[in-house]
Image (tube, rainbow, N blue to C red):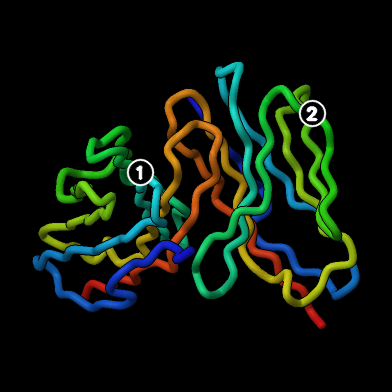
């Protein structure tokens, strides 16, 4: 069974640009959630999608958005990039129930210059 | 509000020493789930264990053991006879009734040869 795949793995952008990150969950998983990981803040929850609907949202500005497609693949977009957006963005998939563990991808490391 | 606290930012031990990683949580939910994840240098978080709020039985898996105590709201993780391969960041997480995971800030474990 293939794991969670995130693309791209590494990218460099400049302030003001926008970026789109992609996540392909494990086959059969309907929940995809996104996290931002920085050295000072740990893992910060961005949002979760379940069956194409946003089910939960963290405390991030509107520049951060996401969506989920009918095949459960998900994208997140960050517009008007700021230096502070430099981070490892992790995607996790799950079956969507309240008891299940998450399966994480290796992340997309974004550097904003 | 829900919260997970991992007070130990970084721990260094010498190989073969035992080490305990602390996790304290807060929640008003009566039904909740606690998790431990390991993040090796590759970046991908790996699920280690799940515990539900009604099961305080301790668990042992090889060199790993977990101690769940509702009375102190703690879910501690012990590695016996640590090995260099155990070096990683370890996250404790809580999941309550909202399907949202709350992660602690992580504990970086360094096992020295």
Residue A43, given in percent of the width and then of the height, sits at: 45, 52
Residue at 73% across, 75% down: B85
User: Is residue B68 found left or right of B100 in the rendered image?
Assistant: right
> Would you call the spot at circle 1 few (<14 residues within 10 Å), some (14-19), or many (20 or more)?
many
The chain letter under disc 1 is A
Locate residue B109: give its quadrant.
bottom right
Please give left or right for residue B7 compared with residue A5 in the image: right
In front of the other: B16 or B65: B65
**Residue A22 horizontal/vertical position (percent):** 25, 63
| Image vertical order of residue A30 relative to residue A17, above or below | above
> Is label 2 on the same chain as label 1?
no
Residue A106 placed where, x, y %? 44, 68
Q: Which residue shows up at 55% across the image and 34% down it?
A: A99
Q: Secondary structure at mark 2?
A: loop
- Using the image, name the chain to which the residue with label 2 belongs: B
Q: Is residue A32 above or below residue B58?
A: below
Task: Give the label on residue A60, or none.
Answer: none
Q: Does B85 appear above or below B39?
A: below
The residue at the point 69 percent across, 36 percent down is B51
- Report helix, strand or loop for mark 1: loop
Q: Which residue is mark 1?
A: A30
Quarter-of-image position of residue A14: bottom left
Q: From the image, state whether disc 2 or disc 1 is nearer to you.
A: 1
Quarter of the image containing the C terminus of chain B? bottom right
How many marks overall?
A: 2
Q: Residues within 10 Å of mark 2 (few under 14, many from 20)?
A: some
In the rendered image, the vertical position of residue A105 relative to residue B102, given as above or below:
below
Write down the residue under mark 2.
Answer: B56
Q: Nearest the camera: B59 or B72?
A: B59
């Amino acid at each position: 069974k293939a794991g969670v795949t995130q693309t791209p793995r590494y990218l460099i952008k400049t302030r003001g640009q926008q970026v789109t990150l992609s996540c392909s969950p494990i086959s059969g998983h309907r929940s995809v959630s996104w996290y931002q990981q920085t050295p000072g803040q740990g893992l910060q929850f961005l949002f979760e999608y379940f069956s194409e609907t946003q089910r939960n949202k963290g405390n991030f500005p509107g520049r951060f958005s996401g969506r989920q497609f009918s095949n459960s693949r998900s994208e997140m977009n960050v517009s008007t990039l700021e230096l502070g957006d430099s981070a490892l963005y992790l995607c996790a998939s799950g079956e969507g129930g309240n008891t299940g563990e998450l399966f994480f991808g290796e992340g997309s490391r974004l550097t904003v210059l | 509000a829900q919260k997970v606290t991992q007070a130990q930012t970084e721990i260094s031990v010498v190989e073969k020493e035992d080490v305990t990683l602390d996790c304290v949580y807060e929640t008003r939910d009566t039904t909740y789930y606690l998790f431990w994840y390991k993040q090796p240098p590759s970046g991908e978080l790996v699920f280690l264990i799940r515990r539900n709020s009604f099961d305080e039985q301790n668990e042992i898996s090889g060199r790993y053991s977990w101690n769940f105590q509702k009375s102190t709201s703690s879910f501690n993780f012990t590695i016996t006879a640590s090995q260099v391969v155990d070096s990683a960041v370890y996250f404790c997480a809580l999941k309550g009734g909202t399907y949202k995971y709350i992660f602690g800030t992580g504990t970086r474990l360094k096992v020295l040869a």
